[in-house]
Image (tube, rainbow, N blue to C red):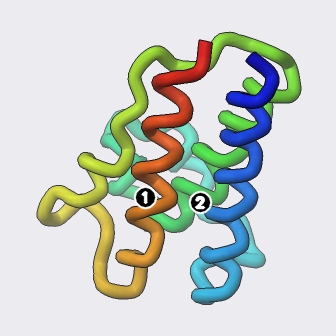
Amino acid sequence: MLSDRVKIAELLLDLECVMRQRNLWASVPPPAQGYTSQVPFAADCWSLAQWLQFLFIPKIRTILVQNQALPEKCSIAPMVMTPGCGLGEEMACLSPILKALDEAIEQAP
């Protein structure tokens, strides 16, 4: 349904806006090896903010624009909340948006 995809696009924009407001948005791309990392969230190469900015957000936007199938399962919020994985205090503000994205992606047809 179109409205599901619009909601996801809006949540991605919200995520980008909050990241920019909190100075979590980079002006320089991270090392290229993060794109081929086998570690969840490319944590061996990138920060979580870099992964969101340079991999997750563009990938989901591409899926939306090309009207491709969305992932059946999206569990970013629980993963980033695990110890040592992601959300420090400076990124805790992203948790509600990431939870909403997980739900919207999983509920979209």
Q: Where is residue 41 drawn, in percent x and y? A: 40, 48
Query: What residue appears at the point 74 percent right and 51 percent down from the top-left corner?
Result: 10
Q: Where is residue 96 drawn, in percent x and y? A: 42, 62
In this orientation, which residue lies closer to the viewer: 50 or 92?
92
Mark 2 or mark 1: whose residue is earlier in sequence: 2
The reply, left or right, for residue 36 in relation to residue 79 is right
> Looking at this rendering, what residue extends furthest in the left direction?
83
Q: Amino acid at mark 1?
A: Cys
In this orientation, which residue lies closer to the viewer: 31 or 19?
19
Rendered view: 75 above or below 53: above
* SS under mark 1: loop
Q: Where is residue 31 drawn, in percent x and y? A: 59, 60
Residue 38: name its quadrant: top left
Q: How many marks?
A: 2
Quadrant of image for the N terminus: top right
Query: What residue appears at the point 67 percent right and 35 percent down from the top-left corner?
Result: 60
**Residue where numbered disc 1 is placed:** 45
Query: What residue appears at the point 43 percent right and 58 percent down from the top-left corner?
Result: 45
Determine whether label 2 and label 1 are within 8 Å by CB. Answer: yes
Q: Amino acid at mark 2?
A: Pro
* SS under mark 2: loop
Rendered view: 98 above or below 3: below
The reply, left or right, for residue 19 in relation to residue 93 is right
> Looking at this rendering, what residue extends furthest in the right direction?
65
Q: Where is residue 89 drawn, in percent x and y? A: 31, 85
Query: What residue appears at the point 30 percent right and 64 percent down from the top-left corner?
Result: 86
Residue 31's tag is 2
The reply, left or right, for residue 8 in relation to residue 77 is right
Quadrant of image for the C terminus: top right
